[in-house]
C-alpha cells in the first residue's frame, strides 16, 4: 500500500474500457498462446485485454478477478457490492490503478474517462513531490528528455530512459580501450596485488548473454541460495576508474558482498552504472558504502538515474531488484531495479503524452503513477525493500 493521497472513488459509476476486448487464454490464436504460455503457470491468470484498434494501447494480461470485473462492467454501473462493501484504502487504490491503466473507466461530468484523463479524479493531491538532490534531479531530467522524444514504443522509450547520462563513445575512448584486454589493463587487473585479492575471495564468472559486457566475480564464501537483489552502484567518471576499482576490491575484502561486476569495454565504462556490487541484505551494503565514501572523497561522479543516493555527490547509490511477478514471460527474463522502473515510467509517459489535462506534465504523471507501486520518487527509495534510507 502506497502513501499517495487518493480520492475515495468506490461509489462512483464505472464501465469497462471499450477500447479493449477481453479474451480468455483459450480463445487466443495458437501463436499468441505459445508466446504467452508461461503466464498459465499462475493459477489466477485468465487471459488478456487486447486493443480493438492499432495504436490505442498495448495488450494487458489480466487475472480472474480483473476479468470478472471487466465482464461485470460491460454495462456502465456501480462497482460490484463486494468491492464497495470493503471501502478500504487497498480496494480504493486497486480500482484507482485499473482506472489509471485504462482497464476500466470512471464516470465524470457526463462521460467516461481513464488513464491520464482521470488524474484529477483519482488523486487527492495534484502536486508531485519536489525532487531535491543531484540524483533525483538527474532522474527528473531523464524523464523530461523521454517526454520530448517522439517514441511511442514503450520498450524503446524505456531503453532511452535506462541509458540516460551515458557519456558518448568518442574516438578517444575507442583508441584508448580497443579491447577487453585493454580495459583489464586500464582497470589494474594485471596488478599483482589486485590479482591476489581477487584470487583469495572471488571466482571469476564466465559471462553469458545478456551479460557479455561485464567482468564479473562471485564470492567464494557467498550463500549460493541467497539473493543478490540489493545493489550498490558506484559511478565515477571513467578516468577515475583505475583508482576506484582498486579501492572497491580492497574494501570488499572483509565485506559480505556476494557478487560484483564492472564494464569490460568502453561502452560499459561510459555508462553511469558501470560498477555494481550485489548483497543479500541492505546492512552490509550500507557498511561498504560508508567505507567507500571515506576512501573516495572528492572523486568526480557521473551519477546513476533512478537510484537512491548514498551521499550528496552522486557517486554511490543503491536499489533492490523486485521479486519476479507472477506469470512473468520466460523470454523477458527478470527485471533489474532500474529496468523495472524505466519500463513503468515509459508506459506512463506514452499514455500521458496526448491526453493529459490541465498543466500537469507527462513526466509528472509518470512519477505519480510509479508512486502507487511503492516507490518514493522524491528519493528513488524502493519502499518494498526492508532497507532504511541513509
Image (cartoon, grey):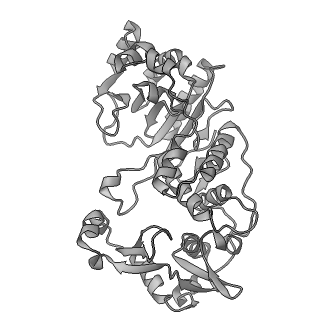
Q: Which residue lies furthest to the top in this view?
A: 192
Rendering quarter of residue 12: bottom right
Q: Position of residue 270 (x, y in %)?
A: 51, 28
- Left or right: 285, with 259 as reference point: right
Image quarter where the N terminus lies is bottom right
Q: Which residue is drawn at 72% across and 62% down?
A: 360
Q: Which residue is drawn at 31% across and 42% down?
A: 225
In-front residue for pair 227/66:
66
Q: Position of residue 78 (x, y in %)?
A: 58, 90
Rendered view: 134 above or below 187? below
In-front residue for pair 207/232:
207
Rendered view: 59 above or below 374? below
Q: Where is residue 113 in the image (x, y as percent from the top left)?
A: 62, 78
Rendering quarter of residue 91: bottom right
In-front residue for pair 176/55:
55
In-front residue for pair 362/285:
362
Q: Residue at x 40, y 59 (%)?
A: 325
- Total of numbered circles in the picture? 0
Image quarter where the C terminus lies is top right
Rendered view: 284 above or below 113? above
Q: Position of residue 129 (x, y in %)?
A: 73, 54
Amino acid at each position: 500500500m502506497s502513501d499517495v493521497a487518493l480520492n475515495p472513488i468506490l461509489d462512483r459509476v464505472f464501465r469497462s474500457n471499450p477500447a479493449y476486448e477481453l479474451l480468455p487464454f483459450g480463445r487466443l490464436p495458437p501463436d499468441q498462446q505459445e508466446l504467452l504460455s508461461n503466464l498459465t503457470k499462475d493459477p489466477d491468470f485468465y487471459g488478456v485485454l487486447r486493443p480493438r484498434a492499432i495504436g490505442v494501447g498495448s495488450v494487458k494480461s489480466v487475472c480472474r478477478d480483473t476479468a470478472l470485473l471487466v465482464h461485470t462492467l460491460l454495462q456502465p454501473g456501480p462497482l460490484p457490492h463486494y468491492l464497495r462493501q470493503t471501502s478500504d484504502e487497498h480496494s480504493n487504490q486497486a480500482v484507482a490503478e485499473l482506472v489509471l491503466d485504462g482497464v476500466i473507466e470512471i464516470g465524470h461530468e457526463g462521460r467516461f474517462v481513464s488513464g491520464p484523463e482521470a488524474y484529477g479524479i483519482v488523486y487527492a493531491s495534484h502536486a508531485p513531490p519536489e525532487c531535491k538532490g543531484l540524483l533525483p534531479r538527474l532522474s527528473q531530467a531523464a524523464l523530461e528528455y523521454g517526454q520530448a522524444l517522439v517514441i511511442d514504443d514503450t520498450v524503446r522509450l524505456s531503453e532511452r530512459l535506462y541509458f540516460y547520462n551515458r557519456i558518448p563513445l568518442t574516438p578517444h575512448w575507442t583508441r584508448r580501450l580497443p579491447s577487453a584486454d585493454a580495459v583489464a589493463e586500464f582497470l589494474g587487473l594485471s596488478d599483482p596485488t589486485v590479482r591476489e585479492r581477487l584470487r583469495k575471495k572471488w571466482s571469476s564468472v564466465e559471462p553469458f548473454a545478456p551479460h557479455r559486457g561485464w567482468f564479473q566475480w562471485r564470492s567464494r564464501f557467498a550463500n549460493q541460495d541467497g539473493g543478490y537483489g540489493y545493489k550498490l552502484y558506484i559511478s565515477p567518471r571513467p578516468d577515475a576508474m583505475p583508482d576506484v576499482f582498486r579501492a572497491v576490491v580492497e574494501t570488499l575484502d572483509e565485506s559480505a558482498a556476494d557478487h560484483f561486476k564492472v564494464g569490460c569495454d568502453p561502452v560499459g565504462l561510459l555508462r553511469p552504472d558501470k560498477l555494481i556490487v550485489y548483497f543479500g541484505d541492505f546492512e552490509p551494503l550500507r557498511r561498504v558504502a560508508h567505507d567507500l565514501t571515506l576512501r573516495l572523497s572528492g572523486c568526480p561522479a557521473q551519477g546513476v538515474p533512478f537510484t537512491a543516493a548514498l551521499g550528496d555527490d552522486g557517486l554511490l547509490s543503491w536499489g533492490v531488484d523486485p521479486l519476479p511477478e507472477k506469470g512473468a514471460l520466460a523470454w523477458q527474463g527478470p527485471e533489474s531495479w532500474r529496468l523495472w522502473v524505466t519500463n513503468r515510467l515509459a508506459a506512463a509517459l506514452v499514455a500521458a503524452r496526448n491526453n493529459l489535462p490541465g498543466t500537469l506534465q507527462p513526466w509528472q504523471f509518470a512519477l505519480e503513477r510509479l508512486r502507487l507501486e511503492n516507490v518514493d520518487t522524491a528519493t528513488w527509495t524502493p519502499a518494498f525493500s526492508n532497507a532504511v534510507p541513509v
